[in-house]
Image (spheres, rainbow, N blue to C red):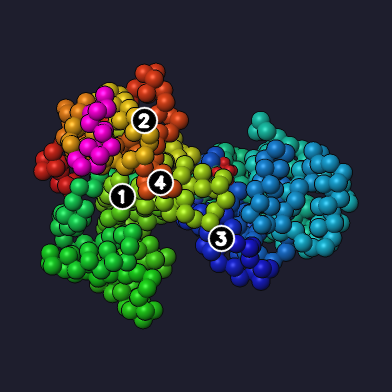
Amino acid sequence: PSPPSDAGTADPLRVLREVFGFSAFRPGQAEIVEAVAAGENTLAILPTGGGKSLCYQLPALCRPGLTIVVSPLIALMRDQVRALTEAGVEAGALTSANTEEETDAVLAALRERRLKLLYIAPERLASGATERLLRQADATLIAVDEAHCVSQWGHDFRPDYLRIGALRKSLGLPLAAFTATADEETRAEIVTRLFEGEQPRLFLGGFDRPNLHLAFQPKDNPRRQILAFAAARKGQSGIVYCASRAKTESLAAALRQDGHSACHYHGAMEAGERREVERRFQQEDGLIVAATIAFGMGVDKPDIRWVAHADLPKSIEGYYQEIGRAGRDGAPAETLTLYGPDDIRLRRAQIDEGMAPPERKAADHARLNTLLGLAEALGCRRQRLLRYFGEEREPCGNCDLCDRPPEVFDGTEAVRKALSAMLRTGESFGSGHLIDILTGNVTDKVRARRHDDLPTFGVGRDYDRRQWQAIFRQMMGLDLVRPDPERHGALFMTDPARPVLRGEATVDLRRDALRAQTSRPVAKA
Ligand code: ADP
Ligand code: ZN
């Protein structure tokens, strides 16, 4: 993928996908990116880890000319320049850590107006030469990272940050300031010193959506689970997200058969048909749309009362964005996300088969693991979700696990048996065959491979097939085992599983996953 041209009209979502390789914005990012790209003065306060750098990097690529990034952290600047360069973006840094050659190369690129982003250490701003240079380089935006460094009362005060305000004024550019920590006084000081008291657009953290009830369920009969969830909310507007186009159609039909007003929506429908669904959804009360993620971007209906995922979303960012379409009016809204081993396999395969470079694939696997960790969580989901986005919270009282804390049991022994069955068969089989071995089921395949002679044969008879499936699913969710896409999804053991196998670590598993199918509650009453 190549970075967009200088036309200044690049679509942020496309750049997000093609240049940064992310499927969705994190909470808060889209609004900030839009304002910064539009050249508004902005002050954004996002928690550490919330994804601040994207909020100036992406607008820089959507705007013509050069974006100047002032940051006090040399190592971070160098990291970002390296990552951007690898993504095909022209970026450079001027810091005291540069070699002479590096500086010469950056200066040449600036003169030729090739750079999209220039990272610059604040002490550089002290020289008049820098200002002349930036004037010539077609700079169109200033981004200030760690903007609280401009505050004399803070512990991170950087005297050179005081020059930024004057630079902004003399270049006549919009300025976007970012920080993770800014109490009211520091905010006021940032406004005074960077914007000369002119009020910038303020984005102030707090990405929690406390009115959304969060819930996950392992799939057992996914269609029935979704129908039960919808039946308990008859007459309310809702969205069911599905992983495939075919499923949107079959689920919409099933919902109609159940007496709901429902239709489907996906990217292969004609534009006119799609617009009609959007229009009906907006205007009618109680319509359910079974859709792929193509549905949503343009949906701005405040009173969507529920969002269900019939399949596991792609990433935790996608999950949060999709459930976030419910309850925009602030009134209570319900969400339910189903997940199963096939989803996990599908999502892993999509990552592995993609064109992304290895580091990005590893990062995508890690992001998927975070979502699976959320699915298999043992404590408050909102607390875990917000922690991922950088916010610390008390347990929320508005998720399925706060409603009914799951019972756990020490699953170490079961996990060790499963790992042992995998290792003794050369990590060459999927869970189905491994479960045959564990439960002592003599199939043709078991006999042909003489797996009935293994010491692990039948050692897992204390659980039945369904229960073992739940154990394997949780092991996948905990990233103790992974399917190998090169070998038809044969399970192999990951590093975190090694201490468990050696008896140096224990594993808690959810007991409810082992309960019989019929006794599991399907929807929140
Ligand atoms: P901050 O500067 O706010 O502490 P970063 O900008 O370093 O945070 O981002 C934290 C991490 O989040 C990085 O690994 C980054 O790649 C990742 N990240 C940022 N935005 C997204 C997104 N929209 N989707 C997925 N990952 C993201
Ligand atoms: Zn909770």
Which is more toward the observer, 276 or 485?
Answer: 485
Marker count (numbered)? 4
N-term-proximal mark, 3 vs 2: 3
Q: Which residue is mark 1?
A: 342
Q: Is mark 4 within 8 Å of ligand 1?
A: no
- List x then y, in percent, for residue 487: 40, 46
Q: Earlier in the sequence, mark 3 or mark 1?
A: 3
Report if residue 451 is visible in the image. yes
Does the stretch in magenta take in 19?
A: no
- CA distance separating discs 4 and 2: 15 Å
The residue type indicated by label 3 comes to Glu
Instruction: Point out residue 423 in the picture as x, y percentages from the top left corner.
Output: 36, 30
Q: Are marks 2 and 1 in contact (CB under 8 Å)?
A: no
Q: Nearer the viewer, residue 479 or 419?
A: 419
Does residue 163 appear left or right of residue 358 in this picture? Answer: right
Residue at 75% from the left image edge and 58% from the top image edge: 115
The verdict on residue 446 being magenta is yes
> Residue 110: percent from the left, percent from the top?
81, 58
In whole angstroms, how far apart are the C-alphas of marks 4 and 3?
A: 29 Å
Amino acid at the residue labelled 4 = Arg
In the depicted view, which residue is nearer to us: 230 or 437? Answer: 437
Between 352 and 185, the residue placed more toward the observer is 352
- Residue sitting at 22 percent across and 31 percent down? 452
Tag 3 residue: 18
Mark nearer the viewer, 3 or 1: 1
Q: Residue at x 37, y 79 (%)?
A: 270
Q: Residues within 10 Å of mark 2 (few under 14, many from 20)?
A: some
Task: Residue 195 in the image: state x and y as whole percent.
Answer: 68, 52
Amino acid type for the residue under numbered disc 2? Leu
Q: Residue under circle 4?
A: 487
